[in-house]
Amino acid sequence: MEREVRLIPYQVLAEVEEVAEVPKGVEMIQAPKIWEKTKGKGITIAILDTGCDLTHPDLKERIKGGRNFTNDDKGNKDKYMDYNGHGTHVAGTIAATANQKGVVGVAPEASLLIVKVLDKNGSGQYDWIINGIYYAIEQKADIISMSLGGPEDVPELHEAIQKAVANNILVVCAAGNEGDGQGTTDEFDYPGSYNEVISVGAIDLERHISNFSNSNKEVDVVAPGENILSTYLRGKYAKLSGTSMATPHVSGALALVKALSNQMFERNLSEPELYAQLIRRTVPLGYSPKQEGNGIVYLTAVDYLVEVLQSKEATNVVNV
């Protein structure tokens, strides 16, 4: 199958040598307020992308293994180094270690499985993606994160995703960057438009829908995707924009949600149950459902509702 899939188009806005902060996107989805309960330890996220800078100080402790399915490094399956930058940036948003320097990811104690399915140019064959999904299933990943896509609906790709979901793996995909800023039109990218995946649109840091973000009835949630600071090649950091940058916020959030749910219910929840737990932690922004789905991922939404209900109950008791 020689047809190619590619990185969702993205923009590199700036590269920097040193930073020391929790990125604004991570704060926007309320991840730091969950860290006293869990930081995602015990949860594995498979990142299907361009590989990863395996020596980056914010990432090297998080990586548990991986595999190369591309022709880079002469097809050596054990070399999954990133020569593009995209995969490293995604990895940092998901799980950059909290080490008092650099950046911190949404789930800073989660484990990363680096599945290199796109080459140094950001493109790859559908077979590479499909084989990468089956590898993630074999490795018993909890979450698969894919900031990639193409215009073609490929049945074999859809089948692989369905197999992952049947194995209770949450599959998170970028919605795509072909949007026209209108909530009435449809723009489809695959695998982001499959019903089985969690399709992620982008907003800016002021919670406005990004003009480039695809809109269609399959969009599930939105997350920060503009001016996103994260890890980059050669131990550096960079700000990038695109639905590619929104997607790892949701993958990391799901790691926290799954860890919390395992504690709360004292069992492993199914994929539909975990999806429901994620949707409970969203807040509508007032845009068309085709643009925002259920709204922004907001991890403390459930806690806020509990507080409101408890305060109302207390008021009622006093009134009685």
Image: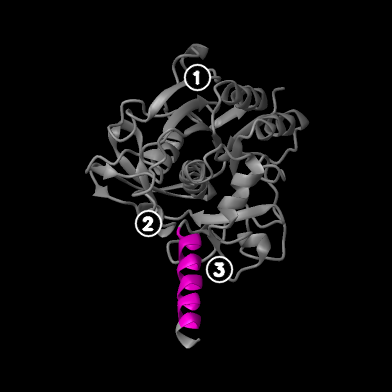
Which of the labelled discs sits on residue 285, or is there none?
3
Q: CA distance from mark 3 to mark 1?
A: 39 Å
Residue 307 in the magenta stretch? The answer is: yes
Q: Amino acid at mark 2?
A: Glu
Mark in the foreground, 2 or 1: 2
Identify residue for label 2.
Answer: 27
The residue lying toward the viewer, choosing from 282 and 85, is 282
Q: Find the distance from the CA under tag 2 to the CA under tag 1.
A: 31 Å
Q: Is residue 291 left or right of residue 93?
A: right
Residue type, mark 1 in image: Arg
Which residue position holds label 1?
Answer: 67
Q: Amino acid at mark 3?
A: Leu
Span shown in magenta? 300-317
Secondary structure beneath label 1: strand
What secondary structure do most residues of the magenta stretch adopt? Answer: helix
Q: Residues within 10 Å of mark 1 (few under 14, many from 20)?
A: many
Q: Secondary structure at mark 2?
A: helix
Sequence-first tag of 2 and 1: 2
Name above or below for residue 52 compared with residue 38. Answer: above
* Residue 160 placement (x, y as % from top left): 69, 29
Image coords of residue 269 (percent x, y): 59, 40
Q: Residue at x 63, y 40 (%)?
A: 271
